[in-house]
Amino acid sequence: MGMRGAGIEVTPESAKIWKSLEGLMVTKHRAMWELFTLQDKDNVDEDAVRAKRTEIRKIEVDIQAAHEALSEYRKGGPGHGQGQGAGARRGAGQGRGAGRGLRGGR
């Protein structure tokens, strides 16, 4: 069971970007756990929490850059990337939970 007509063109360059993206996502995941740990303490160190959030935002910027670099290698079936809202980011009035970010329901 795979994606029909979609995926990434496999080249040495795309593999390098993919591996980098993998590492960034693991790094973000670990940093988020560290943030949760900082926030769970009895005496929360707000400076440490702020620093960890800044670190996470920087990782997210790197993740976005990797996704953009991979876009050069994306391939798709008929109509891929076309139509209303093509290229628009979710949360701009489209999709489930649009505009709510990670906060969930209303």
Image (cartoon, grey):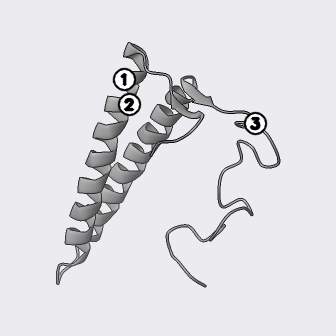
Q: Position of residue 82 (x, y in %)?
A: 78, 38
* In the image: residue 3, left or right of residue 12: right
Q: Tag 3 or tag 2, which sits nearer the N-term? A: 2
Quadrant in the rendering for residue 93: bottom right
- Report the residue marked by disc 2: 18
Q: Residue at x 32, y 30 (%)?
A: 19
Left or right of 40: which side holds 75? right
* Quarter of image, res 46: bottom left
Q: Amino acid at mark 1?
A: Ala
Dot 2 lies on which element? helix
Residue indicated by mark 3: 79
Q: Which mark is residue 15?
A: 1
Look at label 2 and name its amino acid. Answer: Trp
Q: Contact (CB < 8 A) between labels 1 and 2?
A: yes
Asked whether disc 1 touches disc 3, contact meaning CB atoms under 8 Å apart, the reply is no
For residue 61, above or below residue 45: above
Which residue of the protein is positioned furthest toward the top in this rendering? 12
33 relative to 105, above or below: above
Report the disc number at residue 26.
none
Q: Quadrant of residue 106?
A: bottom right
Contact between labelled residues 3 and 2, with CB atoms less than 8 Å apart:
no
